[in-house]
Structure formats: structure tokens, C-alpha cells
Image (cartoon, rainbow, N blue to C red):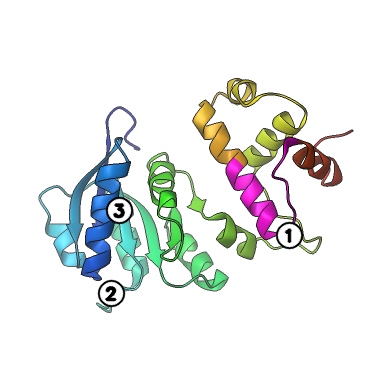
Amino acid sequence: MPNTLSNIRLAIVDDHRMLLGALTEWVRSAADDIDMVVAVPTWPELLTAKEFPVDVVLLDLDLKDNIPVSLKLSTLKAAGVRTVLMSTYSDPAVVREALAAGAVGYLVKSEDASMIAEAIRAANRGESYISAELDLALNATVSGGPKLSAQERRVMALYAAGEPVKTVAFELSISEETAKSYLKRIREKYRLAGHDVGTKVALRKRAILDGIIVD
């Protein structure tokens, strides 16, 4: 079960020690709701840590230990731990394989560090999380428009219809910050698909074109 009553207990496993240290410091300084309880460079050290099991593990997909990632994911799932994978690879086939094996999130190491906390929170809720860029690559459509999740379409429909963010949040029973986060991802998906929806007017026009709202 996801941890919803207290801070999210996080472990990071990455054999690049400089990155491990940087991630640890970033999480500790930038996310008050996430407790960094384990930061180790190897898989065995995670399993033997006295703090294990944790709520969420940020796991390097590219650990050089010859242990199949599917085995790691099944081990963590059996312990009730959610896993977000990190990798240098953004190949859609690699991402699909990781998600199919049981990861609830996937981050490319070249992406903005601010996505890390969002991915960890989503994983703790049991929700899948990948960046807008990866999502676009996985769900490219012939029309050139991005594939939005059902919740993203609901947020876009309400907002594009003229509702303020506060009302959108109320209607969907989510926080105002979460509503803003959805809008940010929607705009990023459209930007990556070659459509500028930076203003509310542009977003409305796009929502009408894509059949999300009716003019």
C-alpha cells in the first residue's frame, strides 16, 4: 500500500557515486515530503539496508551487476516497494520493457531534476510516471498531436473551456498544484509535438481542433 500519512521513504541505487551524491542532496534540499533514507551504489546493499523495505526506490537500470532488472522489480514488488527506473536510454522499446516488467516510472538521466520528485510522488500513489518527451515517443500518433492521459484530457477540457485552475482542481478533486502540474505536462507534450499552446487562447484552439472540447 502507498504511504499517504507520512513522508515518503525513498531509497536511491546508482553505481555512479557522483550522481548518487548529487541526487541525495537534491532530494534532501528540494522535497520536504520525501525522506532520503537509503543511498547505495549496489543492489545487495539496498536489500541488506536496515531501513529496507522503503516506499519508493529510484533504481539505476544500468547497474553493472548482471542481475536481470525483471528480477529486481519482482523482488521490490513482493516487498511492497514501488520502483522508478533511471537510465541513460530513452529508446521506447527499453522503456516499454521496463514498464511491462513492473516499474511504475521511468526517468532519463539527462532530464530536468525537478521531474524526480514528481515521479517519486506518483510512484508512491501507484501511478505510472514518464516524462512528456518519453510519453510522446511511446505514443506518437499519425496526426502529429500528443497522446494525453484521460486525466490530462479532463484537465485540458475544463481549463480550455474557461475554468480557472482553482475550479479545475475542485471539479476533479485534486490539489491546485496538481492541476498546474497537469497543465504544465500538457503544454510540454504539445510543444514536443510542434504545437505552441503557451497561452490559454492557444490551448483552447488546440482543444477544439483535437476534439477535446466543442466550440
At label 1, the amino acid type is Gly
What is the CA distance from the residue labelled 3 to the residue labelled 1? 34 Å
Residue at left 47%, top 44%? 127
Q: Specify the label residue 57 is tagged with.
A: 3
Residues rendered magenta in the picture = 184-200
Q: Residues within 10 Å of mark 3 (few under 14, many from 20)?
A: many
At label 2, the amino acid type is Ile
Relative placement, left or right, of 155 versus 174 is: right
Residue 157: x %, y % from top left: 74, 34
Q: Nearer the viewer, residue 152 or 69?
A: 152
Question: The residue tagged with tag 2: helix, strand or loop?
Answer: loop
**Residue of label 1:** 194
Quadrant of the rendering where the C terminus is positioned: top right
Asked whether residue 212 is in view, the answer is no
Q: Is residue 113 above or below residue 122?
A: below
Disc with the residue nearer the chain's start (3 vs 1): 3
Residue 165: x %, y % from top left: 62, 26
Q: Is residue 158 above or below residue 103?
A: above
Q: Nearer the viewer, residue 91 or 194?
A: 194
Q: Residues within 10 Å of mark 1 (few under 14, many from 20)?
A: few
Residue 184: x %, y % from top left: 59, 43
Residue 81 lies within the magenta run: no
What is the CA distance from the residue labelled 3 to the residue labelled 2? 16 Å
Residue 186 lies within the magenta run: yes
**Foreground label between 3 and 1:** 1
Question: The residue tagged with tag 1: helix, strand or loop?
Answer: loop
Residue 135: x %, y % from top left: 59, 58
**Residue of label 2:** 67
Label total for image = 3
**Foreground label between 3 and 2:** 3
At label 3, the amino acid type is Val
